[in-house]
Structures are given as structure tokens and as C-alpha cells.
Image (spheres, rainbow, N blue to C red):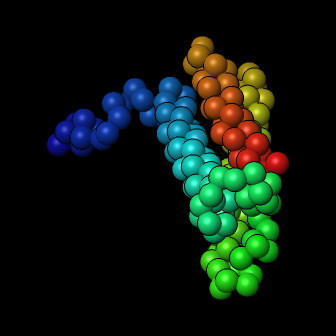
């Protein structure tokens, strides 16, 4: 009966955390979720800024509306859309702050993991460094999309 309980676990007995063979699996899942959250927050920020630029200012793409600041809905004060513009502005600021915090967390934690896996008693897989780069560089691209729209 005890041997049956061993085989019912989600990981085989050789993949326990104590022998150092699967410690990286949970980390990869967490980082994948963090990059996915960063992609969602970047998309939501892009949509919020697009709505602020064109939806509140009348939807026209004339040069006068293109030159308006996306975060300053002063052109709609007189027509009753000021509160809508403020809502979109706060929504864009919220998604910008979430994107910034996620990016900083991903980069700093990947750097800490890289340094931690250089310790002699940690035995990372041979592809570990490349995998950390695959989390950092797409995160940097997604964050660049947020910063580019901010300018």
C-alpha cells in the first residue's frame, strides 16, 4: 500500500525537490505566468492609451488631435466628458505601474537566480542560463512598448 502512494504523486520519486532534480520546474512555471501577466498589462495599457487619445477626443485622427497629450483631457472639459477622460487616464496609469513593477521584478529575480545558481552546491540544468535570458529579453520588449507609448 505504501508503494502505491509513492506512484500516485504527480512527480516520480526521482524528481523530488530534495535530490535537486526538479527544483527549476516551479520557477519556470512562475516566470511564464509573470511574463504572461506582463503581456496582458502591456496590452491593457496600450488599449487604455489608445482610448484616451482617440476615443475621448472625438475619434478623429486630425493633426490637432494627434498633438494632444494622451494624459491631459483638457479639451473635453466643456462638453461633459472630463470624468470619462479622467477614468481612462487613471486606468492607463494603473496598467503602467503594474507593467513597471512586473518588469522590475522579473529582471531582478532572474539576476538573483543567475547568481544563486552559480553557487557550487546548486546544480542547474545546462540550459538554465538561456532560459533566464528567454524571460528577460521578451519582458524588456514588452516594457519597451509601454515606455514608447508614454513619450
In the image: residue 55, left or right of residue 115: left
Q: Residue at x 24, y 40 (%)?
A: 8
Q: Which residue appears farthest toward the top when viewing the image? A: 126
Res. 105 in view: no
Res. 35 in view: yes
Q: Is residue 95 above or below residue 103?
A: below
Q: Residue at x 62, y 66 (%)?
A: 58
Q: Residue at x 76, y 34 (%)?
A: 111
Q: Where in the figure is residue 1, as x and y percent of width and height? A: 17, 43
The residue nearer to you, when weighing 101 against 124, is 101
Q: Where in the figure is residue 98, as x and y percent of width and height? A: 67, 58
Number of numbered discs: 0
Q: Where in the figure is residue 3, as x and y percent of width and height? A: 22, 36
Q: Where in the figure is residue 32, as x and y percent of width and height? A: 53, 39
Residue 134 lies in quadrant: top right
In the image: residue 131, left or right of residue 100: left
Residue 83 lies in quadrant: bottom right
Q: Residue at x 77, y 65 (%)?
A: 71
Q: Is residue 70 above or below residue 63?
A: below
The residue nearer to you, when weighing 68 against 99, is 68
The residue nearer to you, when weighing 60 against 49, is 60
Amino acid at each position: 500500500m505504501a508503494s502505491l502512494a509513492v506512484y500516485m504523486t504527480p512527480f516520480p520519486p526521482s524528481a523530488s525537490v530534495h535530490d535537486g532534480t526538479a527544483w527549476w520546474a516551479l520557477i519556470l512555471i512562475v516566470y511564464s505566468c509573470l511574463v504572461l501577466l506582463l503581456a496582458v498589462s502591456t496590452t491593457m495599457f496600450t488599449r487604455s492609451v489608445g482610448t484616451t487619445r482617440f476615443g475621448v477626443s472625438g475619434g478623429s485622427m486630425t493633426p490637432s488631435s494627434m498633438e494632444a497629450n494622451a494624459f491631459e483631457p483638457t479639451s473635453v472639459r466643456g462638453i461633459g466628458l472630463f470624468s470619462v477622460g479622467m477614468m481612462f487616464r487613471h486606468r492607463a496609469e494603473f496598467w503602467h505601474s503594474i507593467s513597471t513593477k512586473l518588469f522590475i521584478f522579473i529582471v531582478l529575480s532572474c539576476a538573483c537566480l543567475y547568481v544563486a545558481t552559480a553557487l557550487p552546491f546548486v546544480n542547474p540544468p545546462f540550459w538554465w542560463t538561456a532560459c533566464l535570458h528567454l524571460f528577460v529579453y521578451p519582458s524588456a520588449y514588452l516594457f519597451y512598448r509601454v515606455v514608447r507609448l508614454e513619450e
